[in-house]
Amino acid sequence: MNFSPSNLRKVWSREFKRLRSAEYRTVSSIAMENKFLKKLSDDNDTAVILAVIPNAIESGVTTIREFSLRFGEFAPLERQEDLRREHFVMTKGKDKQKDLFEELEVLQGKWFPSAKDEDRKYKIIRDIDNWIKEEDLVAKEL
């Protein structure tokens, strides 16, 4: 999945309007904001960026510059694969994938998982990751 900085900016603006009930207004210049988004997209997976935009806006981030500077708070490296999975499942997943993801969240939330729970968790992760790879291949063929 690859978005241009201008497409990421459109997503930001749309989510800002949806969550804040107000139009997003550029503080600096569109070119500067695109530069911040280009740097983010060069350094991070686009799906992770898309997954954390709503969370950042809900947390009080008001500009794209602030978002790019605080990105690590919303997408720490150890959580990026989980965020990527969540984004794909929530935006492209059917009921089967959403049910699997919900089961995965329950298993990840257990304080003392059994060996059976751990096995199930890794099987779900493998199934979701395989589905994402298939979706990516189909999208590339189109």
Image (cartoon, helix red, strand yellow):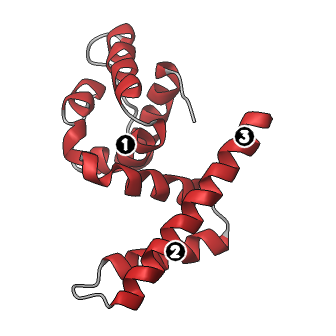
Q: Label 1 to label 2, Cα distance in Å? A: 29 Å
Residue type (three-letter) at the residue carrying disc 1: Ile
Q: Which residue extends farthest right?
A: 142
Q: Residue at x 45, y 72 (%)?
A: 122
Q: Earlier in the sequence, mark 1 or mark 3?
A: 1
Amino acid residing under circle 3: Ala
What label sits on residue 139 in the rendered view? 3
Which is more foreground, mark 1 or mark 3?
A: 3
- Hey, what amino acid is under mark 2? Lys
For mark 2, give the secondary structure.
helix
Q: If you read the primary sequence from the N terminus, does the residue marked by circle 1 or circle 2 appear first?
A: 1
Residue topped by disc 2: 123
Tell me the quarter of the image containing the N terminus: top right
Residue at mark 2 to residue at mark 3: CA–CA distance? 24 Å
The image position of residue 14, as x and y in percent, is 48, 38
Question: Percent position (x, y) of residue 53?
Answer: 37, 42
Residue at the (31%, 19%) spot, across then down: 36
The disc at residue 53 is 1
